[in-house]
Image: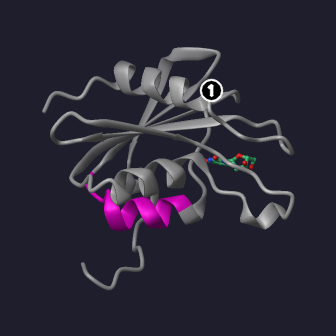
Amino acid sequence: MKIDPKKLIAAAAEARLGSVSPYSKFKVGAALLTKRGEVIGGANVESASYGLTCCAERIALFKALTDGRRDFVAVAVVARCDGGPMPCGACRQLLREYAGDAKVFIADSDDLKTIRKFTVKGLLPSAFVLVP
Ligand code: THU
C-alpha cells in the first residue's frame, strides 16, 4: 500500500469543510487511510456543553470503525494554525488503540504542502493498553 501524504492531507482538508464548530470557530478535518486504500474523513463537532465536543480525529475514527474499517495505515489532520494541529491526548489514546501502526500527517490548512510527519506510537509512548 503506497501512502501519499499529500493526498491524505487533501482529504483531511476536504473533510474539514464539514466541521461544526460554532463556539471555537476552529475547524479541524481528519482523514484515515486503510490498508485497502479506503479513505474515511471526519471533522470536529462542538456542543453548547463544551465538554461534549468531539475532535475530528475521533469522529473519523468512530465513523471508520462503525463502518467496519480496520487496518489503518495513516491518518492526516488539518486546521488553520501554524504547523497544523497536533492531536489531543484523548485522540492519541484512541488512535493508539485502533490505529496503532499508522503514520500521522499534520498540516496547516493555509499551507497544505508543508506536512509534518509522526507515528501514532511516537505520539503516545507507554500507552495504556489492555490488549497489547
Ligand atoms: N480539535 C480537534 O478536532 N482536533 C484536535 O486535534 C485538537 C482540537 C477541536 C476540538 C474543538 O472543536 C476545537 O478543535 C477547539 O479545541
Residue furthest toward the front?
A: 67
- Decide: few, some or many residues near mark 1? Use Cα within 10 Å; few <14, some 14-19, many ≥20: some
Q: Main secondary structure of the magenta part?
A: helix
> Viewer-proximal residue, 83 or 73?
73
The chosen color scheme is one colour
Determine which quarter of the picture holds residue 54: bottom right
Determine which quarter of the picture holds residue 96: bottom left
Q: Position of residue 10 (x, y in %)?
A: 45, 20
- The answer to whether 85 appears left or right of 103 in the picture is right
Q: In the image, what residue occupies the spot 54% across and 24% down?
A: 13
Q: Position of residue 115 (x, y in %)?
A: 46, 25
Can you say whether 117 is above or below 101 in the image?
above
Can you say whether 37 is above or below 6 in the image?
below
Residue tagged by mark 1?
A: 17
- The answer to whether 74 appears left or right of 89 in the picture is left
- Name which residue type carries label 1: Leu
Q: In the image, what residue occupies the spot 37% across and 59% down?
A: 66
